[in-house]
Amino acid sequence: MFVILYYDVGVKRVSKMLKVCRKYLTWVQNSVFEGEISYSNLERLKSEIGRIIKDEDSVVIYVFNQMLYSKREVLGKDKKEETKFL
Amino acid sequence: MKETIYIFSAGTLKREDNSLVFITEENQKKHIPVENLKEIFVFGEVNLNKRLIEFLSKKEIMISFFNHYGFYVGSFYPREHYNSGFMILKQAQYYIDNEKRIYIAKKIVEGAARNSLKILRYYKNRGRKLDNHISEIEKNVEKIFRIEEIPKLMQVEGKIKKIYYESFNEIINSSGFKFTKRGRRPPIDRINALISFSNSLIYSIVLREIYATHLDPRIGYLHSTNFRRFSLNLDIAEIFKPIIGDRTIFSVINKNIIGVKDFEKSLNRVFLNDRGKRKFIEILEKRLNETVKLRKIGRNVSYRTLIRMELYKLEKHLLEDEVYEPLIMEW
């Protein structure tokens, strides 16, 4: 499945979040990630995030079972990098 | 589905923050989501260290290297995680017993031949003159069942391959591509270069799938086990070369995706340049992820999963659970 994830966390935890999310997903913009992920890996990611965040932090994950009827549009520069072919 | 990444540029691959990062020569950092990674194919000049190898082993990621000409150099095959002494014994038992070995070997040759025939018939229905090739191959397929020795089987296999490759000239309709004869070291023409490149890729893809099963890649049945290298992946690849590799070759040429410009000549060999390799991989990758509906299980599976299923079938055969029958394209 495909997910879009974004977070708003305290300054102290920003870099921790970045590192954890980079393990599973592709970076798109500051505090925004997207990418294909398996069900089990999503659960793992959620538990890792759960250990970092505090009560006042917020993380939002959109989960798509399939990408039919969806379109990705970018205005300006697309900061997402190609990682399949390097 | 875990991903494969292909590295063409020069740079350093390293472990960072419990994930992977590729640093290009221009010092640009590209982060690779490690948890979603299955294997890495390296074509460029990449620096790496033991720390990275350790990490890849822990994450069960296989890394394969290819030389400048696109030939397979070798793989880092992480410490086997599905290690089974019982399975190795069974595999060896079926190798040593000639009767048992030749059964599997024959089935592999038969599978490869029947899949080639499927492709030829497909193009015949599209008006290519392939009747002679088809009947010649069919004649040779019948011979397979009467053979009792491996060397004889190899001969018949070679003959089938020869006729099959000769049919390429009928299938391909581009003036820049002409098949003369199969020559591997070095590839003598553009089609040979494509075949060699595609085979190298398929060998390592099959190897990666073997890693996910209990089988040991060092014991093959059609290809003899020797002191040097893996042979089971070469066996299983035979079945998939026509289905995955050759069909990709036909579509990249006939659809003009790869042209004369994507090849390089040096000394007396012809090979794909980086742009050509990349284009070929993109199409091959698309094919691997494409799904087909299998009548037997009534659900859609990708070509990659088909490779895995073939290995499970072999496992079952070795465990005397179900007799091995090769995958023959029914679509």
Image: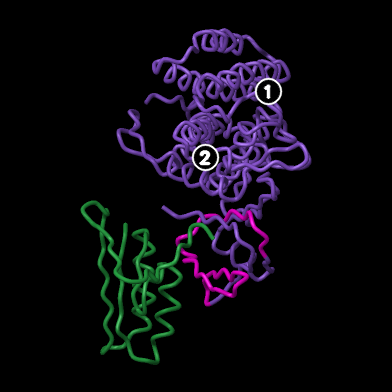
Residue span colored magenta: B17-46
x 69%, y 20%: residue: B154
x 28%, y 61%: residue: A72
Asked if labels 1 and 2 share a chain, the reply is yes
Colour given to chain B in the rendered image: purple
Does B138 sit above or below residue A62?
above
Q: Can you give x and y, in whole percent of width and height, for residue B25 in the image?
A: 63, 70
Does B77 sit above or below residue B316?
below
Q: Which residue is mark 1?
A: B181
* Dot 1: element: loop
Left or right: B301 in relation to B99: left
Give me the chain letter of mark 1.
B
For mark 1, does the 10 Å Cα neighbourhood hold few (<14), some (14 to 19), or many (20 or more) residues? some
For mark 2, does the 10 Å Cα neighbourhood hold few (<14), some (14 to 19), or many (20 or more) residues? some
Give me the chain letter of mark 2.
B
Kind of residue sitting beneath label 1: Lys
x 32%, y 86%: residue: A9
Kind of residue sitting beneath label 2: Ile
x 43%, y 83%: residue: A16
Left or right: B329 in relation to B203: left
Asked whether B218 falls inside the magenta stretch, the response is no
Does B13 sit above or below residue B102?
below
User: What scheme was used to colour the molecule?
Assistant: by chain
CB atoms at circles 1 and 2 under 8 Å apart? no
Front-lying residue, A30 or B217: A30
Identify the image quadrant of residue A56. bottom left
Q: Quick one: label 1 or label 2, which is nearer the N terminus?
A: 1
Colour given to chain A in the rendered image: green
Q: CA distance from mark 1 to mark 2?
A: 21 Å
Front-lying residue, A74 or A68: A74
Q: Which residue is mark 2?
A: B258
